[in-house]
Image (tube, rainbow, N blue to C red):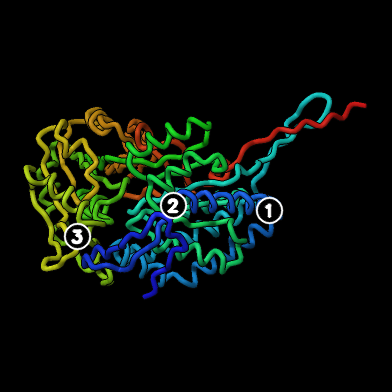
Amino acid sequence: MRFPSSPYSGAGESTVLNPTTGAALADVGLAGIAETDAAIERAQRAFEQWRLVAPGERARLLRSFAAVVDSHLEELAALEVANAGHTIGNARWEAGNVRDVLNYYSAAPERHFGKQIPVAGGIDVTFHEPLGVVGIIVPWNFPMPIAAWGFGPALAAGNAVVLKPAELTPYTALRLGELALEAGLPEGVFTVIPGKGSVVGQRFVTHPLVRKVCFTGSTEVGKGIMRGCADQIKRVTLELGGKNANIVFADADLELAAASAPGGAFDNSGQDCCARSRILVQESVYERFLELLQPAVEAFVVDDPAQEGAQMGPLISAAQRDSVAGRLDSADVAFAGRTVTGSDGFWLPPTVVLPRGDRDPLWREEIFGPVVAVLPFSDEEDAVTKANDTEYGLSGSIFTRDLGRGLRVARGVQSGNLSVNSHSSVRYWTPFGGFKQSGLGRELGPDAPDSFSDVKNVFISTES
């Protein structure tokens, strides 16, 4: 397998590991401040030409980018399995999601409509003007799709993009940068800059030519980025942490709710801001639900992520594994699934814990690993109160046969993305984002290009 190389070296190199085995894959060069500044300045020069490209031609180039990605799906998926430990099924979906996002937003350049507003004495029209250079900071948990959710609509709206992948998972972003050039995108329109967050990411925040920053990651880092962007009144989109509730009512299909709960909590080894890491079960069926949940958790397939049947792979790093394992040292573990043993990789079993009330840190804090906590609730009001008793509000699920209840609870839960009788969170054609400290702004959906543009109003007098 070929691992893409980095053209930068100003901040040294970083050794990238395979989380499945713990073995080194290769060294990746990291950009220093001077190299980052030069890349941003190249992007600004490219933007001045890219914004002038006819909408139909910009659309064609995005479709070409999508087609090239499609022809390299297996390569991209294999890179993600090796670099991020994603199961091969998930990795194929993620590469396909990049393709689909590009295809979806390839329609935007010719449909990014302004308005004609009735006024006296003339004609008033609005235009969507691109911002300039957009900096996208991508996390290690979903390197491919989260990158595309930013650069797809940003490029469609006429911006140039500089993208910083996570230090742990740079390879698919670097390969996408190569594929963009292969597809015919002009040099400098889409640039991938591997480096440290304190260097490259911080320069996105402070460099005056970067007019917007999109960040996905921890709430604490997001707050720092927001403070830094305020100095230049720089636009920012933040997708941050989550502690999402899966609410199971007594009238729900309990077999469905229990069978689907492991996938909702343990997908990507629980390293997902949308993970349903809290399960609220109506007290009259609480014990029965746990009885159904145990075999579902024990049957959840934890295996080498390259195997077709794997449902969960390793955690991203030894540090992440140790952090999650440390949370379990004093926990009341109800039961756990299987895991890979005899490996130097970063493995943990999917684990169900019973928190000591709703103040327990296991219930309240984002663990970002394969751990789910289960608590009972009494009635609908209690369920909504417990679900909302968190600083986060990103996603969540509601299981009930009562459609009215499903809608009432969905409206009552303070979260940006809710699903009734499923664990779906993200579709590229619907908006995605969080309430409270889970983020700011929305990604995806038909209106995403608007967040990468300014509205310009023009009045044309028709009076003599």
> Which image quarter holds the C terminus?
top right
Q: Secondary structure at mark 1?
A: helix
Residue tagged 3:
346
Residue 201 versus residue 344: which sits nearer the camera?
201
SS class of the residue under badge 3? loop
- Image: 450 above or below 302: above
Callout 3 amino acid = Phe
Q: Position of residue 159 (x, y in %)?
A: 60, 49
Q: Position of residue 11 (x, y in %)?
A: 39, 54
Q: Residue at x 27, y 44 (%)?
A: 399
- Residue at 34 percent across and 54 percent down: it is 140
Please name the amino acid that badge 2 sits on.
Gly
Disc 3 from disc 2: Cα separation = 30 Å
Question: Residues under labels 3 and 1: Cα distance?
Answer: 46 Å
Comparing labels 3 and 2, the label whose residue is closer to the camera: 2
* Residue for badge 2: 32
Callout 2: SS? loop
Residue at 29% in and 64% down: 87
Residue 89 visible? The answer is no
Labelled pair 3, 1 in contact (Cβ < 8 Å): no
